[in-house]
Image (cartoon, grey):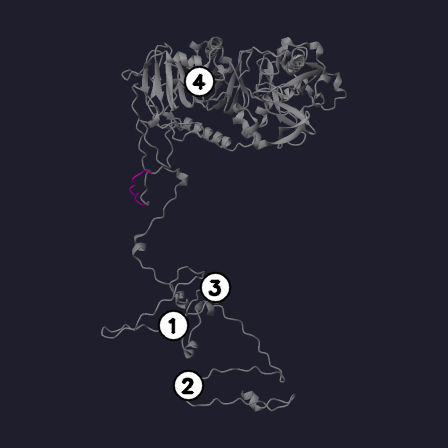
Amino acid sequence: MQKINKSAGMVLLLCLALVPSAMAYDQDEPQSQRPVLVGRISYVTGQLLRYVPEEKDWVATVKDSPFGLNDALYSGNDSKAEIIMPNGTWMRIWNNSQIQLIAAEDDFTEADVASGVARFYNKSTDAVIKATTPFGYVLAPAETSFDLYVGDDSLEVIAMDGSVDFIPASGDAKYKVSAGGSSLLADSQQVSSGDGIVDRNWDAFNTERELIWGRRLHARSDSVTYLPESLHDEAYALDENGQWESVYYEGEYRRFWRPVRAGYGWAPFTRGHWTVWYEDNCWIPDEEFGYVTHHYGNWIYVGDYWYWAPPLARVDVAVAPDLFIGFGWYPGRVSWIYSGAYVGWVPLAPSERYYSHRYWGPRSYPVAHADVRNFRINRYSYYNHAVIVKQMNLYGVADYNSVRVRNINNINNFRAAPVVNNTVINNYNNITNKYNYTNTPLTRKPHESVTQRIRYNERAARQSANLTGKSVRQEAMRIKSASPDQHVKVENPMVSNKLVAPDAVRRQKSEMNFPQKEIKRERAINQAPVQLGQPAPDDGAGHPQPQMQKRHEVQPPFIKRQPPSSRQYGNEPQPPMQERPEVQPPSVKKWSPEPSIQHYPQARQPFSRQYRKAPQSPALKTRELQPPSVMEYAPETLPQRYPQKEQPFSQQRRKEPQQPSVQPQPNEPQAPMPRPLPMQHPSQQRQQFPRAPVGQRQQLEQPPFVQKYPQAEQPSVQPHPLAKQPVVHQQPQEQPQQQNQQPTPKKRSKNKPGEKPGPEYQER
């Protein structure tokens, strides 16, 4: 018994000794904070502006830049943008639109649309989207999508997939808006129904983007196996630009990703630029694969190549804790070094800490907890791969390979720093271009009145910090349902363009005259169908106006959509269904044939794809085609089951002239019909040609195309007197053979060798 107790005590001591070593790698990591969810601007066309709170000014942003809490964006004229959140929320905005992120959790996203047009997709399985406006907010459950048209005095909500709820600013009722039904119009006092029509150009842009992402997700292969579920949308970039390889690292073989199209000598954090975002230096990549590989996971140098280790959603103590990065977004996992007028950065190994001004995720430590005295450059694993530039080239450079300093005599003279501050760069706080995402100057900026809504949302973000998807759903269930008032009329949304010259940003709003226009300028109900080949109506200034149509029927490739017959609406009254306008046939010109009656109208094709039909002459319908004269020399062919290949003229037999056919008399017995030949395979079938009598063959004339090219005359050559003359066989005339007539025996020559042949041989 004592031996058993002694063995159990040894096992307990061993377990207690292993626990501190297993948890030593993250014992100083803050455990009370959750990783920050950061979105990505995945597409930009036109000019997209970002508000910088530190400068209280606007800068132009670019593709693959972050979109996080309290970030406010404003799109310019003829601009479009797409934003993807890692929790399954997708947002797209059109021109003159203002959007701001208020909250982002795993099961909840809250964004504010102050003006313009936006479309939301909830592609998650259990998350909730809350889209706020000055007139109320919209709640969208999982696997739904909807459009928001927010004007100065009213808004319109159109459900594209599924059903969403609209709660006005008063919060005393909720209105259900379903796909396929009428839309909802609301202002600050009343709620009514709309026609449910979306803009044609806006819907075409969303459909195009959905098809692009559908092809990307269907083409993904190996990368999905190694990425967390929330990063599956980024797998296409890894598959198209690199490959997964088995690399021996830290005592065992592991699967890492290596870029193969970047070129030899490529290194991370070189093709792109730094910008300050939330007080930390954030990397804006220039490669297609740069966003996911520079903001998630970690870079590892093995041999002569850089490999990317993906993040892990969870870690087991028994599986290499030093390699565990954890799932989290980071501005850029590097450490900073400086010396005199030079500044540089070193990529961090998986086991090295990342210091920043705030907590971002696992292995992230606020700089307030850092001990600057322990920072030495030789403590970093990849300090020999540091990127060093001059301080003046740290910001405002698109590619650091062109300004990189490579002739460093002794890198050990550099000092290490956790973050960039006034110690690293003198007068760092007064650098103004460190917030720029591009060097493009702005010719127009939003008016100062736009920032009033931004400051209001910042206060609302502090109240929404503890909200979750479950609490938002429970709060919405306590609100009673209502129906729109059909007797009231709410004006269509009208939006103002608040982009002004930079010198007019601070002017009073009363002094400004913002141009106002309707978001949907042409209503499809009152618009005549445009004929094919004719230009669309313009707005009076020569600019074609966007055409309107019913909601596009092309469904997103990866959004589940239930048929209308299977949806459960309950006992709530439903808005009337809008009838789809009939497709008008295109205008027919006088030379085109009459359109045939069809039970189902065909979709109109673009004018460039319509093939003109040649006019048919009435004379061609009644005129009988005469065989050409050349056909009289062609051989007669029998009916064949398999058509044969046409032979060249040199191999064809000339057709003999046919005797005129004699019509039999009525009383005359007719000859029996010839028995048809058995059907044979073309390879075994032979053509039968009638043969004319021998005496008549010499009377045939040559074909015209044979006589046209007569053969050249051959020169006459006198034969040698001793040469043997060729024997000419003459065809005897056919005579009736007499009976009992014996054949004449042949005479043999009696001449000796060397003598001339006698007359008997010549005769023969």
Residue 705 in the image: above or below residue 576: below
Q: CA distance from mark 1 to mark 2?
A: 25 Å
State the mark number for residue 657.
1
Q: Which residue is mark 4?
A: 129
Residue 692 in the image: above or below residue 617: below
Crowd rating for badge 3 (residues with CA inside 10 Å; few <14, some 14–19, many 20+): few
Horizontal side of 354 relative to 503 (left or right) equals right
The residue closer to the viewer here, 717 or 429, is 429
The residue closer to the viewer here, 685 or 722, is 685
Amino acid on which disc 1 is placed:
Pro
- Please state which of the two labelled residues, at mark 2 or mark 3, is closer to the viewer: 2
Q: Residue furthest left?
A: 667
Crowd rating for badge 2 (residues with CA inside 10 Å; few <14, some 14–19, many 20+): few
Residue at figure coordinates x 44%, y 18% from the top left: 129
Question: Where, by quadrant of the figure, is residue 1 drawn?
Answer: top right
Amino acid on which disc 2 is placed:
Gln
Residue stretch in magenta? 593-601
Crowd rating for badge 4 (residues with CA inside 10 Å; few <14, some 14–19, many 20+): many
- Please state which of the two labelled residues, at mark 1 or mark 2, is closer to the viewer: 2
The numbered mark, 1 or 2, whose residue comes first in the sequence reads: 1
Question: Where, by quadrant of the figure, is residue 485 drawn?
Answer: top left
Q: Which residue is mark 2?
A: 735
Task: Work out whether residue 269 can be spotted.
Answer: no
Q: CA distance from mark 1 to mark 3?
A: 21 Å
Amino acid on which disc 3 is placed:
Pro
Magenta-span inclusion, residue 596 = yes
